[in-house]
Image: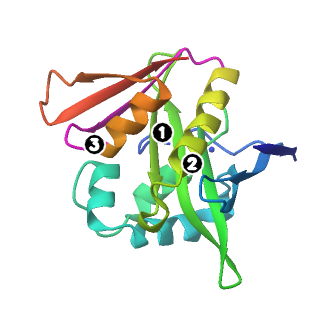
């Protein structure tokens, strides 16, 4: 990815994104070009539209439950990133003259200052092109730069796409001892 110098899990509140941001054009496996950059406060409507366009199954996998619409409180939480303790990177493409969000990856620090929780979501019509890998690699690099030593994701155990992505990126998988329907994917950074 070419960088040009110029980011929670629900419930992670961190502040305002830094003024200096990384932007980059990523070429995917099918030759498509996408812009990957940090989430900004003015992306709120774009993020809400992205969530709305996801299939019900994609929303269920991302939020670990059924949801039709992101509440204002959830949107506040998703938009509250500082670029260090919490970060989110969105993938954008031009669609009929407008920038459309087609993917997002994010992390948020946990109570353990060396550990962060992550999530990645890709629009249904952009899956299986390498976008989730590109977003996660950017997120992993950022988490390393900010001193995190471990990253994890909690997913439905039946989510085979996430299992495959996590394995490809070097995450290990374990079952959540408190809930057999969930799997925990962990990466040492």
| Rendered image: mark on residue 12 | 1
**Horizontally, is 173 left or right of 2 in the view?**
left
* Distance between the alpha carbons at the discs numbered 2 and 1: 7 Å
Picture layout, residue 43 above or below residue 62: below
Q: Residue at x 46, y 54 (%)?
A: 128
Magenta span covers which residues? 146-160
Q: Quadrant of the C terminus?
A: top right
Query: Can see residue 146?
Result: no
Q: Residue at x 64, y 53 (%)?
A: 39
The residue mark sitting in front, 3 or 1, is: 3
Secondary structure under the numbered disc 1 in the rendered image: loop
Picture layout, residue 56 above or below residue 114: below
* Distance between the alpha carbons at the discs numbered 3 and 1: 27 Å
Q: Which residue is mark 3?
A: 160
| Rendered image: mark on residue 107 | none
Q: Which residue is mark 2?
A: 80
Q: Residues within 10 Å of mark 1 (few under 14, many from 20)?
A: some
Question: Residue 42, located in which quarter of the rendered image?
Answer: bottom right
Task: First in sequence, mark 3 or 1: give its number.
Answer: 1
Secondary structure under the numbered disc 3 in the rendered image: helix
* Distance between the alpha carbons at the discs numbered 3 and 2: 29 Å
């Amino acid at each position: 990815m070419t960088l040009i110098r110029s980011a929670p899990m629900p419930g992670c509140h961190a502040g305002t994104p830094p003024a200096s941001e990384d932007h980059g054009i990523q070429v995917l496996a099918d030759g498509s070009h996408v812009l990957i950059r940090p989430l900004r406060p003015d992306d709120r409507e774009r993020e809400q539209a992205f969530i709305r366009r996801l299939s019900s199954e994609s929303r269920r996998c991302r939020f670990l439950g059924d949801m039709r619409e992101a509440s204002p409180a959830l949107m506040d939480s998703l938009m509250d990133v500082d670029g260090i303790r919490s970060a989110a990177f969105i993938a954008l493409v031009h669609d009929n003259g407008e920038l459309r969000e087609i993917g997002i990856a994010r992390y948020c620090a946990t109570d353990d200052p060396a550990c962060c929780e992550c999530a990645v979501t890709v629009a249904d019509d952009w899956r299986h092109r390498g976008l989730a890998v590109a977003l996660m690699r950017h997120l992993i690099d950022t988490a390393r730069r900010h001193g995190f030593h471990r990253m994890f994701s909690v997913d439905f155990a039946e989510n085979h796409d996430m299992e495959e992505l996590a394995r490809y990126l070097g995450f290990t998988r374990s079952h959540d001892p408190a809930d057999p329907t969930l799997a925990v994917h962990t990466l040492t950074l």
